[in-house]
Amino acid sequence: MHAQETTFKELVQGEKQFQVPLYQRTYSWQQDELRQLWDDMLELVEEQLEGRTPATHFLGSVVLAPGRITAGGMQRWLVVDGQQRLTTLMLALTALRDRYRERGAERDADRIHDLVLVNRYRNGDDHYRLLPTQADREAFTACVENTPKAGGPGNVGSAYRFFLAVLTEGEENGGEAWMGAVETVLSSLLSIVEITAAEGDNVYRIFESINNTGVGLRQSDLLRNYLFMCLQTRGESVYRNHWLPMQDLLGPDRLELLVWLDLVVAGNSRAKQSEIYRDQKKRLEPLSTDEADLEAEIASLARRAERLMRILEPRREPDPELREVLERLSRWGGQTHYPLALQLLDRVDDGRATPQQAARALAYAESYMVRRLLAGLSTTGSNRVFMEMPKELEKDDDPADAVRRFLSRNRTGARVWPGDEALREAVRTRPFYKAGRSNQRFQVLRRLEESYDGSEPVDYAKASLTVEHVLPQSPAQQWYDLLAEDAEDGQSPDELHALLVHTLGNLTLSADNARLSNHPFRRKQEILDASALRMNQRIAAEERWGRTEILARADELADRAVRLWPGPAEGVVQAEDEWAGWRELRAALLAMPAGTWTTYGDMAALIGTHAVPVGQHLATKAGLHGAYRVLTADGRVSAGFRWPGGKESGDARSRLEAEGVPFDDAGRARRSHRLTTADLATLLGRDTADETVPSASQAEAEQQTTADRFEAQLRDNQTEETVQGVLGALRFWEQQGGQLAYGRADETSCFPMVRFGAASDTARALWPLGIYPVAGTVEVVFQYLKRRPPFDDEPLRRELMTRLNGIQGIDLAEAKLDLRPSFPLEVFSGHSEEICAVLEWFAHTAALAEARRMMDDGPDML
């Protein structure tokens, strides 16, 4: 075998083809892997644009085996390992080519197409530089050829749409020069080790050997080995007195985190967790010949370990005011605030700041994150903002003033700190329930409740509180009658419900979600009035609960939010910035898979406005990708639809049909292909998991209570034939050894599950369906299956869809393979046995995969 370092451009140049053999799994990179690669690339792009000489980023290795040379001299290579990287880079360059074309840069587009993506003078399969496995081939070639089905469902289409979205967003801010820098990074600054097998090598054995699991050294392990190699005489005492206590205190994961934070706090705002060893070694090399200096560095790191534990476990912090804000940030989750918090604790312990100053500084950081969440601003880039902050603190005596000034500067995009008026408007209109993560939404409502200063404090650890919609998500007719009284001219109760239901003014905390359910307001009043929470008592005091009351409560909560979370410094003018909703609309259009459509109302509810301004924006804003996918509420192309900017011709219906959206004789798109507001939120990465993911484990008494509640809701809302069909299928599932889990929201959903390992091991729990007895729908949870073996393999998810679509009454759109498409619960009334057959196949497939996993793990377990 021969190995050499190369770049992507050098690897693919010339007439050649890279073919992924059949024993390779399908393309599997998802949002986390794509985002990590993109973040690494952006650093190189920034360095290039700033005129610095960017270092290459090591992407990994590609193992190739020579295949036959075709007639005409084209070399074919088998991709033994590294197909995920090759496919990802090809899709990124495909998206870049298409962005060039959209802005009229045809020569740039042709250069990428002819020199990277295809063998221009070859036909058939030989035309493509990369030939994925057959399961991925159609989706990949659709992107390369830019057919109407480009960017469809599945991981290949999702990766293409990801790159199209980030390139579009970046080009809006960076322009032509930025696009050129991205191309340079993709082609020439991503380092790849090309390993070439010799003829006669057993390529399958090579693949098997490469992919055997093993435990590699961590970055902190490499750093430790380097440091103690330098400590020839003091190594034993330094290890015993400093390193070992630090290692025991933190554990391996937290030690890795500390070593990275140590770099950031030292001023390296571009430090990557994947390159800790390289950067720390570079920083410490000048000290490597002086053992006393190295010992001082390790002792300093050990002191920071204790401070890191105060951030991770705030109960360790002795000062009550500082402890309180650290606790709030800990409950908020994530690591965004860690660099700032560690720098502040350094200053407190060194006597360069008071605990009160540190608490105020962290409160401003909290306000920055909360206000951005309430305003619906993206979290992308926030980590970089906080990584840059430690350098700022060294310049000011009062760290609180420095933090507020730093966050208040004239900024755009990732650095906007919404002011009071922007915050008030967002609280009235934004769908808060679809923002951020579920724990963050909970913490906002918790802090708002605490601001009422109730006489009896709530024990949040024991109260089992969850977020509750007062106006229900699935309202009964009485609610729609009430909304009809409040609707504006031309506005339906459905549209008003979509605009109000997820706003902060309609949300509260309750331990009685199941009792509240979708009952009329009079019944909810009784339950809320008995609550210990002051915010619930105030809701219960209202005579009715419609548009006026929800907006009035939103205004009250906005006043409290302004006081709890102070905004930018006075006198600082924020940059004029486009309304966040329009950026979100563009992102949603780019995220929609080919073969789907949505409505003006769904898009309006997503971004917190009305359908009319959405229609006006789509009609007047040039260059909006995918605007033709937004239709009227009944699925028709709007009579006033025009291609944005007039760059395209033809009618929108023909374009949608070419993508795979069927229309009926009346010109209405099939509803199975429609994306709801919830679907759009999922595609944008919004965390709505608390609505649909079943509990990992439930006590026996609770399990029985939720089971009874599910059956009661089923009988109250469905026909007897449907009830018997559903219960019969669930009994069959249990007879096959499956379990039933239940949701905890107001509508008690049911999930037929198979579990392997401990009950708490949620990663190895599988469920194909979620059954909703009040809404009368069954969701097929492809969104969750795509991250759970064996259904993370796309062909298995497609087979599940095909089997279900073979049942009369079920019509799941292929374009929703990454989402949670649904079918009517009433299908159970006549086709319960057919559904049972699909459930049996699902359980058998999962059990067979688990058996294989156990066999593979067997030698390691001996």
Image: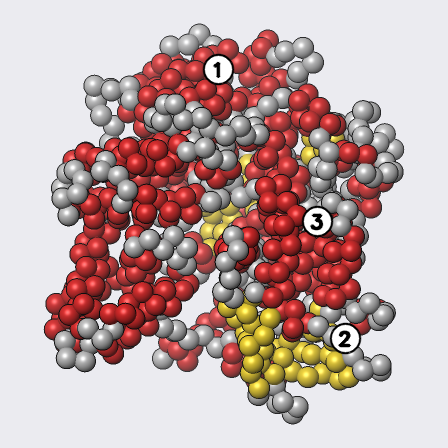
The location of residue 685, given as percent across then percent down, is 53, 44
* Kind of residue indicated by mark 2: Glu
Is residue 466 in view?
no
Name the quadrant containing residue 771: top right
Image quarter hosting the N terminus:
bottom right
Q: Residue at x 13, y 44 (%)?
A: 351
Check the image and name the residue furthest to the front: 51
Q: Which label's residue is closer to the chain start, 3 or 1?
A: 3
Alpha carbon distance from label 2 to label 1: 64 Å
Mark number, residue 99: 3
Q: In front: 494, or 573? A: 573
Say which element carries label 1.
helix
Q: Is residue 31 above or below residue 853?
A: above
Q: Residue at coordinates 80% horizontally, 72% vertically from top-left?
A: 126
Residue sitting nearer the eye, 225 or 109: 109
- The number of numbered discs placed on residues in the rendered structure image is 3
Q: Name which of mark 3 and mark 2 comes first in the sequence.
A: 2
Query: Which badge, 2 or 1, comes first in the chain's sequence?
Result: 2
What amino acid is found at the position of numbered circle 3 in the picture? Arg
* Relative height, residue 674 to residue 140 (above, below): above
Q: Nearer the viewer, mark 2 or mark 1?
A: 2
At numbered mark 2, what does the secondary structure look like: helix, strand or loop?
A: loop
Whole-angstrom CA distance, mark 3 to mark 1, is 41 Å
Q: Residues within 10 Å of mark 3 (few under 14, many from 20)?
A: many
Mark seen at residue 15: 2
